[in-house]
Image (cartoon, grey):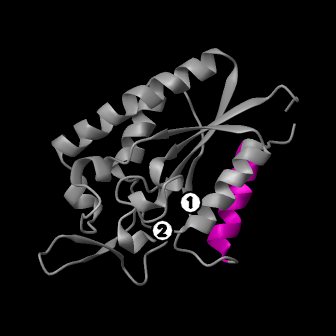
Amino acid sequence: MSKKDKKIVLISQCLVNPYCRVHILGQNFPLSRELLDYFMEHKVGVIQYHCPETIAMGLQRNPQGRQQYDSIFFRDNCKKLLKIPMLMVREFIKNKYRLTCFIGLENSPTCGIHWGKHKINRYQTESPNPIDKPDANEPALKGIMAEILEEELSQENIKVPFLEFPTQSEINSEKRKKFWGDLKNAVEPEI
């Protein structure tokens, strides 16, 4: 890419403000700082949308699975929250900026990219805890907001990678290495 490559990224709010996360996802400020430092170092502008879970249920919410959020009302809330960020994406693209990727959150029922099978709780609904030994061949759903965002971008014919921020993975884990490699490929593609 040329030196005039103007880049933006679309992210979920909790990547900038970890206090928005439900407690089991962890409030990993050092990892958020590492991400934001990367954006600043590589001159990547950030567009974020408000946390749909916090808006709908507040900060004192209990952890839930994707199944509990998958309602007409929550989906409508997500669509409303994306209106302004999508206008911003369109405006930046119109002015020759490149949307590099979307970054969601590992194991988030709303902003996750790979929501696989989860344990069933005592109420016979999906829990926020993944099963111990997932089937690698089983397709994973996106979180509700990530799914809606994918639809919105598709309507605009915008295709970008959807990456998952590995807040629950160890520092030297393969998930972390893969995330940083995928982010680098999205932001700094070789010609």
Q: Is residue 15 left or right of residue 74?
A: right
Mark 2 packing: few (<14 Cα in 10 Å), some, or many (20+)? Answer: some
Residue 82: x and y in percent read 39, 33
Quarter of image, res 130? bottom left
* Amino acid on which disc 1 is placed: Phe
Residue 114: x and y in percent read 46, 60
Q: Residue furthest bottom?
A: 132
Q: Give the range drawn in magenta.
A: 173-186
Pointer 1: what residue? Answer: 165
Quarter of image, res 186? top right
Residue 38 lies in magenta, yes or no? no
Q: Which residue lies furthest to the top in this view?
A: 94
Q: Looking at the image, which is closer to me, 165 or 135?
A: 165
Q: Residue furthest left?
A: 123
* Above-or-below relation of 14 to 148: below
Q: Which of marks 2 and 1 is nearer the N terminus?
A: 2
Q: Is residue 100 left or right of residue 18?
A: right
Q: Is residue 139 in view from this perspective?
A: no
Q: Is residue 163 in view from this perspective?
A: yes
Residue at disc 1, secondary structure: strand
Residue 185 lies in magenta, yes or no? yes
* Amino acid on which disc 2 is placed: Gln
